[in-house]
Image: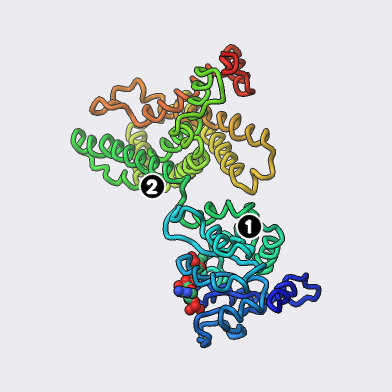
Amino acid sequence: MNKNSSNIMALAPNTSNKRETVCIFGTGDFGRALGHKMIQSGYPVVYGSRSTQISNLIPKDAEVLSHAEAAQKAAIIIIAIQRQHYNFLIPLAEILHGKVLVDISNNLKLNQYPESNAEYLAQLLPGSRVVKAFNTVSAWALQSGTLDASRQVFVCGDDVEAKQMVMNIVRALGLTPLDKGSLLAAQEIENYPLQLFPMWKFPIFLSLGLTAFFFFYCLALDVIYTYIYEKNNFSFFIAITIPNRVCPVMALILLALVYLPGIFAAIIQLYRGTKYRRFPDWLDKWMLCRKQLGLIALAFASLHVVFTLVTPMRAFVSWRTSKGIISQALNNKTEPLNNTNAWISDSYLALGILGFFLFVLLGITSLPSVSNNVNWREFRFVQSKLGYLALILCTAHTLVYGGKWFLSPSAYKWYLPNIYILSLIVPCAVLVVKFVLIFPCVDKPLTQIRQGWERNPKHSE
Ligand code: NAP
């Protein structure tokens, strides 16, 4: 009777400015860090522990009691204890009845148990109101106040009022709660801290593989070949020349790879005559990491800009320029301005600048803070229309610069094509197929399919 009335009192709305006492079970690393932060934010904290001896590490304004005594002092109890010890809570079921239990636990592996820790806690104590929260914040971040990672705290639970109480605490600690719904979301929230850039794996491995390939390709053709056949030691090309060849090539290929899965998807939909069949797994995964591919492409393009800007500072370039001037002086003859070359160089620079500008625009609109402020149509317009325009400009930039290599026999060292020729294969293929797809005779059925029309509807078979 007494126990129940204490629960009701603790859950009553707080009309004064004084914050309600919060109980934390467990005086370990996380329990102490959270306790510190709560005391700083004005919450009286009482710990429930196996040992009531106060150590120096425990926040000095906090009380340490047995679990049963501590639980009676608060409506909200934060369980800062590993899941494998939850059994010790069963004898406390009566005291914990009606209380809000905050499960903050994490696991060591993805999907380690069949049910989430929070659901397991709710099964052990069906009379309590379990809320999942705080597991994505680290003890170190809480204690040092740096909160280097996200300030967002995912919260989920079946009891709306209990969830609100926990979200109020989260806000009071200077963090941002994000309601993820019912306790069914707990498994996903528990898996979250164990993930290591899941969407970035494929784009990063692909970029590393292609970068290594193009680097060694350039090394073979520009340094080793020149050394063997022309007896010139151009090993210093490794520092700037080769990276400045690889970066634009990578930027262009990766940008084309952002748009290639969309082309495959369109062809598959046209072939099947329906949008209601799942794409193959590889295509689904590829589509999901297009943003990451685009951001890596932008990083390569930015490096290319920086490498290009430092070109006039290079010893090799100033040597080559002065060699040209001296040879003109020795011959007592000024080379006339080659108008075609001037046009080619200005055009490829202009195309590069415009392409890079659009590239940056694409990168900016993919930031969550920006994409949240545009509607779906605006987002599609930037990412699709302006994205294709960026691809056209960057492809043209490479074509104008590297075009001369197509016909020159000196470009085929060891019968291998120049890197610029290789870099144009994927972007040109994407642009040609896209050009075919926008013909009305292809675009019309594709649009109809995407609006739900089916060539052979199942129900009419
Ligand atoms: P910890 O330092 O090992 O502390 C765990 C505490 O649990 C102990 O100090 C102990 O408190 C209590 N405990 C241990 N065995 C027990 C048992 N048999 N029965 C009852 N209580 C027992 O661990 P922690 O780093 O604080 O982590 C606690 C929980 O927070 C874990 O579930 C973890 O996944 C989660 N978490 C931790 C972090 C982090 O950065 N550390 C971040 C997010 C989530 P008493 O001695 O006071 O009884």
Q: Residue at x 51, y 64 (%)?
A: 105
In the image, taking residue 354 as reference, residue 261 lies left or right, namely left
- Which one is in front in this view, the residue at disc 2 or the one at disc 1? 1
The residue lying toward the viewer, choosing from 413 and 108, is 108
- The residue closer to the viewer here, 290 or 395, is 290
Q: Earlier in the sequence, mark 2 or mark 1?
A: 1
Residue visible at 65% across and 67% down in the picture: 100
Quadrant (top left, top right, bottom left, bottom right) of the N terminus: bottom right
Do we see residue 130 in this rendering? yes
| Alpha carbon separation for disc pair 2 and 1 | 62 Å
User: Which secondary structure, mark 2?
Assistant: loop
Q: Residue furthest right?
A: 15
Local packing at callout 2 (Cα closer than 10 Å; few below 14, some 14-19, many 20+) is few
Task: Say what amino acid the circle numbered 1 marks.
Answer: Gly
- Seen at 70% across and 65% down, the residue is 165
Which residue lies under the disc numbered 2? 314
* Residue bearing mark 1: 157
Q: Is residue 449 left or right of residue 55?
A: right
